[in-house]
Image: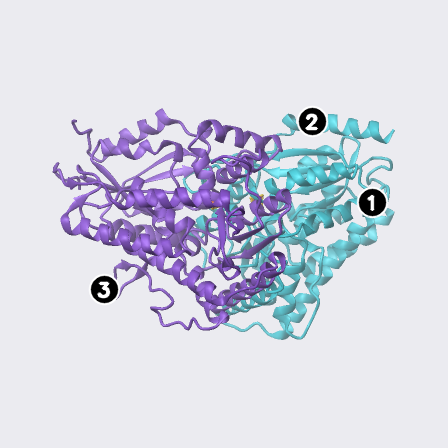
Chain colours: A purple, B cyan
Amino acid sequence: MVTSIKKYQTRPLDSFKKAMELRKEYYQNVMEAKQQGKLLITGGADSMVALPAGLGDYVFFEGEPYGATISMDPEFSGKCVEAVEAKNFARDMCAYMRNYWGSMFLNKYYFGGEFPKPDFVMQLGFCDTHAKWMQQVGEYMNAPYFGIDMPVGTPGRNVDAKVKYLTSQMNDAIEWMQKVTGRKYDDDKLREAVRNECKSSALWSEIVCYNKAIPAPLEQRLIFSLYIVCILRRHERKSVEFYEMLRDEVKQRVADGIAAVATERCRLMDDSQPPWYFLQLYKYMEKYGVSVVGSHYSFFLGGSLEEMPDGSLGAPKTPDEMGMPMKTREDILRAYALWYVKKPIISQMFALPHFKSETMLRLVKEWKVNGVIFHLNRGCEGTAFGQMENRLALTKAGIPVMTYEGNMADRREFDEAQTLKRIDAFMESLGLSKLEG
Amino acid sequence: MTLDRAKEIVTNRHDYAREWKKKTGSKVMGYFCTYVPEEIVYAAGVLPVRVIGSHEAQSYTEPHIYAMFCPFSRDVLAQGLRGKYDYLDGIMIGHSCLHLRQAFGAWMTNVPASFSYYMYTPAKIQSPHAKELMLAETIEFKKAVENWLGRPITDGALDKSIEVYNTNRRLLKQIYELRKADPPPLFGSEAIELVLSSQLSDKAEHNKILESVLKELPQRRNGPQGGNIRLMIIGSEDDDTNFLRYVEGLGATIVADEHCTGSRYFWNETIPEKDRLRAIGNRYVNRPPCPTKDWESRRRFVHIMNMAKEYNIQGAILVQQKFCDPHEFDIPPLKALLEKNGIPSLFLEFDITVPIGQFRTRVEAFLEMLQLEVV
Ligand code: SF4
Ligand code: SF4
């Protein structure tokens, strides 16, 4: 399983800088939305962010990435979670949410100034937290709130009814948004945003497929820096352009045999969000010649994979590529709803554990993975859902597995020394020792 | 008293189901959440029983569910892994919280059953479209049960099932109505046992139990005393009647509840209409909501405050299963709302085994404080 040491060629990724710029610009836009005459909407990262596009210019301020950002700053994050606890909310609730709520209760935006006041709140709910998180935000910020219910259920069952349910709710949302903002709704803008979103997501999916190559052109830390555009701004043209550029660059890296980790000799996958305040974890594993080539989470938060004619997993077809009509509002909403119904992050991760296990097994095989590390993440009941069953399924298939406990955005629940110790032991079990130099 | 029969069913729930199976030669289906259209199962001649825990310390679930999930869900799974429910022919769950769904998923993978079904029950019950989706899901579920059994579920059977279920709900509500009196004729622990036994037994038989209880209660001499502190219990799943007995032994009577093991289970009836499946589905959309289904506006709080008023409560115990996300969202604002309305409350966090000893000081102090307020 573990091959001899060989050094691959490596070089920095040009697109990385662009991703960082787009992220920075996004948080600036959140802060300046009002001055720029844009609507400010807040909601979850998985919300249907293209839906408000028909209203004109807007910024969609997403809760989870903001919570993750805060968690990287121990001092500010500490104040945030304490502010939430002071209001008697439990400390085992979603850690992203507690960072976001804390920032809201303290009235401090992490990037400076006051916490941005949204014009309205819009959420897509599929974990126990989503809808209730934003209910509190709406009440506290005195902002109108519209929630959309994502019908999870067994994948593949009742698809038409689920699409209809989502479409009807989106139609209601459009009426509602017009009422609360006083703006008219333009379907052409909706069409464009939906197209951008689907295209961004399909491009991202195509990019992660290039990581099947040995050596992997990307590793997990880099992946986290790159998927963020698809999470924050996937409905924008800028996002599509970014992923086109990234796709070309990654494709070239594969052609040139460029590795993300020069000493790649073992390929791992991990599970759930990482402890954001300790991304050194990946650097640490690199010392062993480990390249973490991705995860169910990092692939699917922005992307989606479908079975290709040759039986392998590949990028999904966009509604246009599938030949779905996109003429009327009804057409667009139907295509958009179907896109969400098929999203693996929702239909697999949140339905029943075995759906995710099945996909994980395929990822392990196709991405040529030697082992899987589960972050048993106390900070997110969503990604922690079914993890132990996933672990059992992989073990049963003979895949080496390791777990460590933590919390993606509350460092009080993470033991650095203990985690590194476990990693050392896992590496040893894989026959790996630290590389010199 | 027939009340004892209810307690017996709860205590010997496995024997009850096994005997029922033997007697009828039919199948038994375990359900994991009260958001399942039981009427369809019952109409198919299958006995639906709610799967609950046993409040015993256990070490079975660790490889399957991580400890950050609620004790109830872990306790439930432990029962399956231990083989306590080996008589179940099928299992099902309606979409509610991730915790219980995880127990269901692990059960499905590790405990053999010939039928397992995860049904989506809409979370945005306030949406005008929820009923349509509920109908579509109910239709699919009915088909799945028919395929499993290899026979159709007739309209006649559905009508009968709706009638039996509605009777059960009506009778339970009549008994709850009596709890408005001072003193109420039954303890809160007994009321919860009545509801739990309903979830665990054949409703037709249970209706007879309820009818007898209704007849017997006016003559009862050993019920709660008048002048006791009137309490309401609110929150997560709570089948721990020992804890309730303990509280009621301290000069308080639990006169109302808002739990899925209590009033939330039976509060509203199915309103019959020609499209039976629609009628059944609508009832679940209209029922008093679980916190996960209570948004955008907070209808649950309105319901709780109405109950608090109607039952003339003096204090509330807010029960939360540890790590129960749904209730963790509602409890702080609910506590504030109760207080704003002059209703003091005590918050308690439950684990698989309920540490009465640990709670003693707090419960006693709370009741003392309420007694002083009454004086
Ligand atoms: S618990 Fe997890 S899935 Fe749910 S809102 Fe928080 S981060 Fe998202
Ligand atoms: S107690 Fe809470 S978390 Fe547990 S099953 Fe019930 S609602 Fe879900």
Is residue A61 found left or right of A434 in the rendered image? right
Q: Tell me the SS state at disc 2.
A: helix
- Residue B185 has which mark? 1
Protein chain holding label 3: A
- For badge 2, the amino acid type reads Arg
Q: Which residue shows up at 29% across the image and 31% down it?
A: A423
Q: Tell me the SS state at disc 1.
A: loop
Task: Point out the image quarter for the N terminus of chain A.
Answer: top left
Tag in front: 3 or 2: 3
Q: Which residue shows up at 30% across the image and 59% down it?
A: A315
Badge 3 and badge 2 both on one subunit = no
Q: What whole-number distance in Å separates the C-alpha atoms at marks 3 and 2?
A: 65 Å
Around disc 2, counting alpha carbons within 10 Å, would you say few (fewer than 14), some (14 to 19), or many (20 or more)?
some
Q: Are marks 2 and 1 in contact (CB under 8 Å)?
A: no
- Residue A23 has which mark? none
- For badge 3, the amino acid type reads Asp
For mark 2, what is the residue? Answer: B362
Above or below, A211 against B317 in this view is below
* Residue A323 locus on image (x, y percent): 36, 72
Q: Indicate which disc, 2 or 1, sits on the residue closer to the N terminus.
A: 1
Q: Which residue shows up at 65% across the image and 52% down it?
A: B289
Around disc 1, counting alpha carbons within 10 Å, would you say few (fewer than 14), some (14 to 19), or many (20 or more)?
many
For mark 3, what is the residue? Answer: A310
Around disc 3, counting alpha carbons within 10 Å, would you say few (fewer than 14), some (14 to 19), or many (20 or more)?
few
Protein chain holding label 2: B
Q: What whole-number distance in Å separates the C-alpha atoms at marks 2 and 1?
A: 27 Å
Q: Which residue shows up at 74% across the image and 54% down it?
A: B172
